[in-house]
Image (spheres, rainbow, N blue to C red):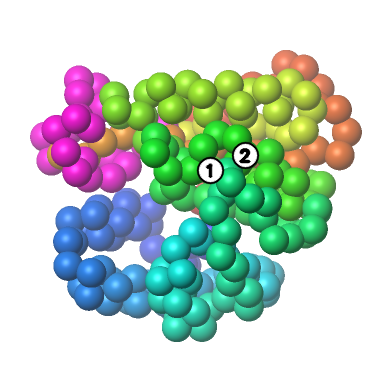
Amino acid sequence: MAQEEGRSLSEARSRVGVLHGITDLGDKLHFYKRWAPDYDQLQARGFLQLHGVDGSPEMLEQARARGFYQRLSLCILGQEPLPSSEGTFDAVLIVGALSDGQVPCSAIPELLRVTKPGGLVCLTTRTNPSNLRYQEALEATLDGLERAGAWQRLVAWPVDRWELATSELEVGPGTSDSDGFISGIVYLYRKQDVAQVEGVRPSSQPPADL
C-alpha cells in the first residue's frame, strides 16, 4: 500500500466511494486502470516484487493485463495453502475479502506464514450488522495469534465510511450514514520472531503514511 505524494486520505476515500457506486463491469475496470500510476509508488518505496493471488481465473487475467505483478497465482484462501514458502514477503495485504461468505478466518495463519519476521500484515473487514459475527470470529483469531507471540498489533483503525452498502441487510444504527456508507476497520500487524511482550495495546490512529 502506498500513498501518492500530495494526495490526502480523504481524497482516496472519496475515490473508493465512487468505485462502489459503479455497477457496470467495463466502467469499473476503467476506474481501476486510472489508479495504475499509484502502483509506481510501491516501487519508489522499495517494494519491487508484487505477487498476487485470487480465486478467480478471470480476475487474474485482468490483473495480468495491468502488468503490475511479477507473479500471479490461482489460490482459494482457506481451502489451500498459499503458493509461497514461509517467510517470503516483507508485507502481505488482504483488503475487502475478509467477510462472511468470502475468505474464512482460518486463512489468517497462512497469511502470517508467508510473511517475513518483522514484516507487516494488513487486513480489513466490515463492521456493519450483517458482518458482526464474522468480525467477532476474526478478532478472536487475531487476538489468539497475538497472545501466542506470533505478531504484534500496531493499528486497529475504525473507518466510518468504509464502503457503500449493497443491500438493506447491511445497514443499521451506528454502522451506516445517510449516504448509505457502512463502517469498517483496518488492522496492521508486525510479525514477531520472539514472544510478544504482554501489555501492548493497539493504536486507534492510522499510521502517518497509511
Looking at the image, which is closer to me, 65 or 180?
65
Looking at the image, which is closer to me, 104 or 165?
104
**Does 166 sit left or right of 60 as displayed?**
left
Residue at mark 2 to residue at mark 1: CA–CA distance: 9 Å
Q: Reading the chain from its start, which is encountered first: label 2 or label 1?
A: 2
In this orientation, does residue 28 appear? yes
Can you say whether 57 is above or below 55 in the image? below
**Does 11 sit left or right of 2 as displayed?**
left
Q: Amino acid at mark 1?
A: Leu
For disc 1, the marked residue is 123
Q: Residue at x 38, y 53 (%)?
A: 9
For disc 2, the marked residue is 108
**Does 127 sit left or right of 117 as displayed?**
left
Please count the marks in the image: 2
Residue 43 occupies which quadrant of the picture? bottom right
Q: Position of residue 8 (x, y in %)?
A: 37, 57
| Mark nearer the viewer, 2 or 1 | 2
Say which element carries label 1.
strand
Residue 178 occupies which quadrant of the picture? top left
Q: Position of residue 193 (x, y in %)?
A: 86, 39
Q: Amino acid at mark 2?
A: Ile
Q: Position of residue 78 (x, y in %)?
A: 58, 43
Query: Which stretch did the figure color magenta?
Result: 158-179
Given the current orientation, which residue lies at the most extreme left position?
Answer: 178
Task: Find out whether the residues at labels 2 and 1 contact each other: C-beta distance under 8 Å.
Answer: yes
Can you say whether 57 is above or below 19 in the image? below
Looking at the image, which is closer to me, 24 or 161?
24
Say which element carries label 2.
helix
